[in-house]
Image (cartoon, rainbow, N blue to C red):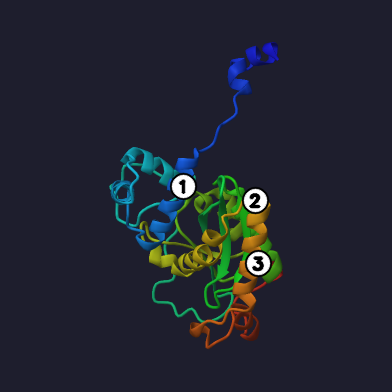
């Protein structure tokens, strides 16, 4: 082992090091930040640190900013252009402005959210049909890489065909080559929210709010398998047994299956 470490120019202590993860206090802070961010998505690290101080937690803005970054939370206010996107990550224009979205598979949307657990946290991605609010696929991951988002996308396409337009925010999971290549190879038009405009993807934001208050915060999952089972049960209830006033009292599943489809199949896209 000493020889192998020497060849790789790393110390043995570095090789054997195991990350300790976040402390119990940081995990509690992350849950509090997540709950408050649902109420005030315009809070940046400075304002969130002030809010935590009023709850009895004296933490620095730098610490809050690091935790928000780890959770993938970005406030909606406009910020100076102090960083440049990756040169290979193209940002596409927002295509939904002024469009009447009323049919299944006309527009799909996706987003990633932070899922707190009793010890640790996960990230959840969901693919949703915009018009009917149906969750078409979802995946959990312990990191913010793009792989689980791409897997959820292909799962939805294989099960339901292709939409006309796919809308996301400008998160790196969605601006990367793999995700956009999957969309383009299926003949799907790509739409992205304006920077800082969370309302451009408001359907998924509403889903996160309901999921967290009705499932995640009530259960405090111990393990990933518990979270997967609990979230899966809630999404099944949401899709099949929860009527929406905006859908004339239908469930998302009923609204999706009873209307003519506006999209097209993978076979048609390939042709």
Tell me how far mark 3 sits from mark 2, CA to CA. 14 Å
Q: Which mark is residue 10?
A: none
Residue holding disc 1 = 28
Q: Residues within 10 Å of mark 2 (few under 14, many from 20)?
A: some
Question: Where residue 133 sits in the image (x, y, percent)?
Answer: 54, 74
First reached walking from the N terminus: tag 3 or tag 2:
2
**Rendered residue at 54%/36% (across/down):** 21
- Above or below, 207 against 52 in this view is below
Query: Helix, strand or loop at disc 2?
Result: helix
Tell me how far mark 2 sits from mark 1, CA to CA. 18 Å
Q: Is residue 120 visible?
A: yes
Residue holding disc 3 = 233
Q: Is residue 162 visible?
A: no
Question: Where residue 19 sits in the image (x, y, percent)?
Answer: 56, 31
Along the viewing direction, whichever of 71 and 213 lies nearer the viewer? 213
244 sits left or right of 41 in the view: right
Question: Where residue 246 sits in the image (x, y, percent)?
Answer: 48, 83
| Tally of numbered discs | 3
Question: Where residue 207 sits in the image (x, y, percent)?
Answer: 51, 68
Along the viewing direction, whichever of 250 and 262 lies nearer the viewer? 250
Tell me how far mark 3 sits from mark 1, CA to CA. 25 Å
Query: Helix, strand or loop at disc 3?
Result: helix
Query: Helix, strand or loop at disc 1?
Result: helix
**Rendered residue at 70%/65% (across/down):** 158
């Amino acid at each position: 082992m000493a020889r192998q470490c020497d060849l790789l120019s790393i110390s043995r202590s570095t090789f054997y090091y195991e990350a300790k993860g976040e402390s119990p206090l940081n995990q509690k802070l992350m849950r509090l930040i997540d709950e408050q961010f649902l109420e005030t998505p315009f809070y940046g690290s400075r304002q969130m640190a002030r809010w935590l101080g009023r709850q009895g937690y004296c933490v620095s803005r730098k610490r809050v900013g690091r935790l928000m970054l780890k959770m993938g939370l970005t406030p909606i206010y406009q910020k100076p252009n102090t960083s440049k996107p990756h040169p290979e990550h193209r940002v596409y224009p927002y295509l939904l402005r002024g469009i009447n979205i009323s049919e299944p598979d006309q527009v799909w949307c996706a987003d990633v959210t932070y899922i707190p657990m009793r010890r640790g946290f996960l990230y959840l991605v969901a693919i949703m049909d915009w018009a009917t609010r149906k969750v078409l696929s979802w995946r959990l991951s312990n990191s913010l890489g793009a792989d689980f988002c791409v897997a959820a996308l292909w799962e939805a396409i294989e099960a339901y065909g292709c939409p006309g337009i796919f809308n996301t925010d400008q998160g790196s999971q969605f601006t990367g080559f793999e995700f956009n290549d999957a969309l383009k190879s299926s003949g799907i038009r790509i739409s992205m929210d304006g920077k800082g405009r969370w309302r451009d993807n408001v359907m998924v934001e509403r889903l996160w709010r309901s999921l967290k208050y009705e499932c995640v915060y009530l259960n405090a999952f111990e393990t990933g398998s518990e979270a997967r089972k609990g979230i899966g049960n809630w999404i099944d209830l949401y899709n099949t047994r929860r009527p929406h006033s905006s859908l004339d009292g239908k469930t998302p599943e009923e609204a999706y299956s009873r209307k003519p489809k506006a999209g097209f199949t993978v076979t048609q896209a390939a042709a």
